[in-house]
Image (tube, rainbow, N blue to C red):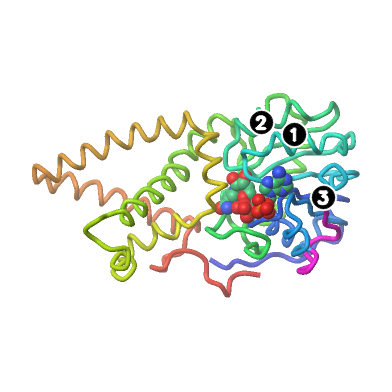
Amino acid sequence: MPERLGPPRETPLFERVALVGLGLIGSSIARATRHLNLARSIVAVDASEAVVERVREIGIADEATTDVAAGVRDADLVILCVPVGVCGTVAEAMRPGLKPGCIVSDVGSVKASVIGQVQPHLPDGVSFVPAHPVAGTEHSGPDAGFATLFHNRWCILTPPEGMDETAIESVRAFWEAMGSNVEVMTAQHHDLVLAITSHVPHLIAYNIVGTAADLETVTQGEVIKFSAGGFRDFTRIAASDPTMWRDVFLHNREAVLEMLGRLNEDIALLARAIRWGEGDKLFDLFTRTRAIRRGIISSGQETPEPDFGRRREDKT
Ligand code: NAP
């Protein structure tokens, strides 16, 4: 699947876009926004002086600051790209800078909690359109981003009931311009679906890599030396940002626990099938799961390469 951005727009979609948090996601949005001319000016806001300095060096924004209220001033679109656990604090800090008519959005991997944290701090006349780009890598920081990250990936919008339709359409247009396919659903439904498709798989990866590292009979050296494909793929996922993932689990607690309960039941059934030599049950499951993998590849959400993921030469 080619990963190419289209030509820049003649007229930007927004005058001034402020991105708060210039890590993997924020810096990817900055790069795509600049490349596609989606905003006349881009302001980068980050709590870290080092990140702000790096953003200036690599030149992915027109302005960069650690002052969130100053950074969002006069922006017509503000996107929170910070870990979900700090969204409320950031919203409170940026409130004095928000202009009437501004749209606030975010990219958090959990939606109901972010809505609960952010909405109470937004003044009247400011619209909130939460979003979650279902795209990412295990890398963090402003150097990890790339402009094609969202290309041919889903972006889920979870606007609270009664939200201004024009604001929703503006955010949809922004993500579509970056190459995403946009879907709208409730925050609760999003959190349940993502618990099984993203959050629980990450928990399993963290768990299996942790267990292997702790095994007394296998030294860590041997775990690395003999890591077969399956384990290697888990280590890639388990290298994901600790702050981001701690917050995801703490803020999507109910849905993750619900899905973990089901998973535990299914693992018990698998253990039983292995114990009693019920090969047909294992074979049937593995045949079904192989079909799911093939479906993901044919829908363009994954490449068939055994080494999983995007090729470097596809990145802009
Ligand atoms: P990241 O690379 O770690 O970047 C987060 C940035 O936010 C860092 O520069 C961080 O600075 C900064 N930050 C932290 N607290 C802040 C605050 N209070 N005010 C301003 N800046 C602050 O993380 P990411 O992967 O881009 O993730 C950002 C968001 O995107 C998360 O909500 C995550 O759930 C969501 N998301 C991530 C992925 C993914 O695969 N990574 C995919 C979809 C959505 P420090 O480094 O100094 O803390």
Q: Is residue 309 left or right of residue 50?
A: left
The amino acid at mark 3 is: Val
Q: Quadrant of residue 263?
A: top left
* Residue 109 vs residue 304, the one in the foreground: 109
Q: Along the line of sight, which residue is nearer the eye, 104 or 314? A: 104
* Residue labelled with disc 2: 115
Q: Position of residue 266 (x, y in %)?
A: 27, 37
Residue 65 lies in the magenta-colored region? yes
Q: Quick check: is the Cβ at mark 3 less than 8 Å away from ligand 1?
A: no
Q: Nearer the viewer, mark 2 or mark 1?
A: 2
Question: Can you identify the residue that label 3 sits on?
Answer: 17
**In whole angstroms, how far apart are the C-alphas of marks 2 and 1?**
8 Å
Q: Is residue 173 visible?
A: no
CB contact under 8 Å: marks 2 and 3: no
Residue 181 shows which numbered tag? Answer: none
Q: Residues within 10 Å of mark 3 (few under 14, many from 20)?
A: many
Pick the residue in front: 52 or 26.
52
Mark 1, Cα crowd under 10 Å, few <14 / some 14-19 / many 20+, is many
Q: Magenta segment, which residues?
A: 56-66
Q: Position of residue 51 (x, y in %)?
A: 72, 59
Q: Residue at x 31, y 55 (%)?
A: 212
Q: CA distance from mark 3 to mark 1?
A: 14 Å
Label 2, label 3: how far apart the Cα atoms are: 20 Å
- The answer to whether residue 66 is left or right of residue 157 is right
- State whether residue 79 appears in this view: yes
User: Does label 3 or label 1 sit earlier along the sequence?
Assistant: 3
Q: Earlier in the sequence, mark 2 or mark 1?
A: 2
State if disc 1 and disc 3 touch (CB < 8 Å).
no
Percent across and percent down for residue 80 are 71, 44
Q: Amino acid at mark 2?
A: Ile
**Pointers 2 and 1 in contact (CB under 8 A)?**
yes
Q: Which residue is mark 1?
A: 128
